[in-house]
């Protein structure tokens, strides 16, 4: 069979052109969405009397047969048929005869492909939301087990103040919660129906776009046909959100790499999420979080790639828009793979509580509490800050930490110090007194966990 659009042409398509312009190698992923859109379209054509009801039923039966073949991987998609739309339509005509050619009445590949991608992203966005919740659930598991586990909190990667380990991991819970909210909100834009826009100007046939939207579950119909076929904002938004999600995954992965190093030893990742060295038998490499960190770059590239494709396009459809799919598919697959690995890796990791506690005992992260102590005694904060700076310098010079200094040594720096300074400096006390909403005290962390469980409906 010749090209379905070949009536105007006198020559066969150059084979190199055919291969260069074909998209079937990747857009075959849209086969089920393409069939679903066609089923809705032909149902509407029959109901509106645009084609005979018996023809519509015959086309639907043929499409269902093709869907079964696709489900069973029995379809060989051909480059010479260019894309998923032409491949399926050609299969349909081969199955049911010329009546299959009536399927394309009142539509174009331009509105057809846009509809396919809306359907695809609607499904994938919903699935990724569920995967994010699995990661959040794994973070809750670690948080509930480590409310009273203390870890150095860092700024500038320098020890700052001790915090609950549960508080630290819950920070990522809320990052992923915002990611979920962004995805949920984006569904409002994904759920716009382009079908019925035609090539760019609508159609002369008396179609019922509202009926197609009803069948396919779309909430909104594009009110402008030119916008409908050329809009890729919904993909840009997904790629942007996907990049933010991968940023959060990368930040968490970086901490897992650092924490599992010999220098820190705060956590140990389960063997099933690590690999060894081909030459150094002692090595246990955190390859999974490293690769999660590395894959972030490809999601950024997919976003920048599509932004660049779109920035100079005039209305309406242009062949450049064929470049919208591979990056979208890649980001979907990257997110799915990353989130599916991240959840069990977090849940199975071992937290080395004693090593974390030892780290807190051997630093000056309780220094701020001495300043607060002196402020409560009436010393201005700036003066207290200077006093504590001198105490820390003295301790460093003498190879001591703040809890190692004698009461007499503290008195040399300020007569405001009393024996209760040692209670103030105890790490548990330092954490417990930060009891403002969102703080790291056990009381607030428990409230935070309960709030997180509420978000997951647990």
Image: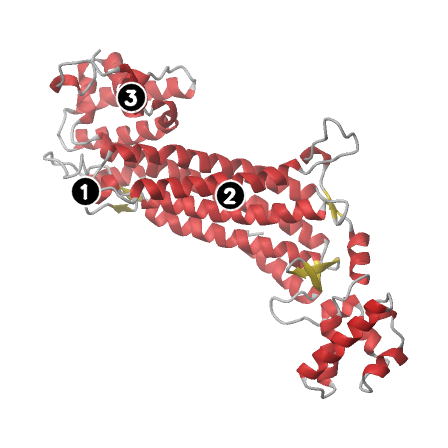
Question: Is residue 433 left or right of 33 when viewed as pictured?
Answer: right
Q: Quadrant of residue 419?
A: bottom right
Q: Residue at x 67, y 82 (%)?
A: 382
- Few, some or many C-alpha atoms within 10 Å of disc 2 (few <14, some 14-19, many ≥20)? some
What residue does disc 2 label? 130
**In front: mark 2 or mark 3?**
3
Whether residues under marks 1 and 3 lie with C-beta atoms below 8 angstroms apart, the answer is no
Q: Residue at x 18, y 35 (%)?
A: 198
Near-viewer residue (340 or 83): 83
Question: Is residue 55 left or right of 426 when viewed as pictured?
Answer: left
- Few, some or many C-alpha atoms within 10 Å of disc 3 (few <14, some 14-19, many ≥20)? many
Of pointers 2 and 1, the one earlier in the residue sequence: 2
What residue does disc 3 label? 82
Q: What element carries label 1?
A: helix
**In front: mark 1 or mark 3?**
3
What residue does disc 1 label? 225
Near-viewer residue (331 or 135): 331
How is this picture coloured?
Answer: secondary structure
User: Does 361 sit above or below residue 354?
Assistant: below
């Amino acid at each position: 069979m010749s090209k379905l659009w070949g009536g105007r042409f006198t020559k066969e398509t150059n084979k190199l052109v055919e291969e260069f312009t074909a998209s079937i190698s990747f857009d075959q992923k849209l086969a089920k969405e393409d069939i679903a859109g066609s089923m809705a379209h032909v149902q509407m054509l029959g109901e509106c009397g645009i084609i005979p009801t018996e023809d519509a039923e015959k086309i639907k039966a043929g499409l269902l047969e093709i869907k079964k073949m696709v489900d069973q991987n029995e379809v060989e998609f051909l480059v010479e048929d260019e894309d998923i739309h032409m491949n399926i339509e050609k299969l349909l005509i081969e199955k049911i005869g010329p009546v299959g050619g009536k399927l394309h009445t009142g539509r174009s590949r331009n509105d057809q492909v846009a509809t396919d991608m809306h359907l695809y992203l609607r499904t994938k966005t919903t699935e990724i939301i569920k995967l994010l919740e699995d990661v959040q659930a794994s973070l809750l598991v670690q948080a509930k087990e480590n409310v009273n586990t203390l870890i150095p909190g860092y700024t500038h990667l320098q020890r700052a103040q001790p915090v609950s380990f549960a508080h630290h991991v819950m920070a990522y819970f809320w990052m992923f919660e915002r990611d979920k909210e962004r995805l949920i909100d984006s569904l409002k834009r994904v759920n716009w129906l382009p079908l019925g826009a035609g090539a760019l100007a609508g159609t002369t046939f008396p179609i019922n776009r509202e009926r197609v939207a009803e069948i396919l579950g779309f909430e909104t119909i594009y009110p402008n046909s030119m916008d409908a076929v050329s809009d890729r904002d919904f993909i840009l938004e997904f790629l942007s959100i996907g990049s933010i999600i991968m940023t959060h995954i990368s930040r968490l992965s970086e901490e897992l790499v650092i924490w599992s190093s010999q220098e820190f030893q705060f956590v140990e990742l389960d063997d099933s999420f690590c690999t060894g060295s081909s030459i150094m038998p002692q090595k246990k490499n955190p390859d999974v979080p490293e690769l999660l960190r590395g894959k972030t770059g490809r999601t950024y590239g997919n976003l920048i790639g599509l932004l660049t494709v779109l920035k100079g396009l005039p209305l309406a459809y242009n062949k450049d828009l064929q470049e919208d799919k591979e990056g979208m598919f890649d980001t979907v697959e990257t997110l799915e793979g990353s989130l599916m690995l991240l959840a069990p890796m977090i849940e199975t990791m071992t937290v080395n509580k004693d090593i974390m506690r030892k780290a807190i005992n051997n630093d000056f992260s309780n220094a701020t509490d001495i300043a607060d102590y002196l402020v409560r005694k009436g010393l201005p904060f700036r003066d207290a800050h200077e006093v504590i700076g001198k105490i820390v310098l003295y301790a460093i010079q003498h190879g001591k930490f703040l809890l190692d200094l004698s009461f007499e040594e503290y008195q040399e720096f300020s007569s405001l110090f009393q024996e209760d300074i040692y209670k103030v400096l105890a790490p548990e006390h330092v954490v417990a007194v930060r009891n403002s909403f969102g703080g790291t005290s056990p009381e607030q962390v428990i409230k935070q966990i309960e709030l997180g469980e509420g978000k997951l409906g647990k």
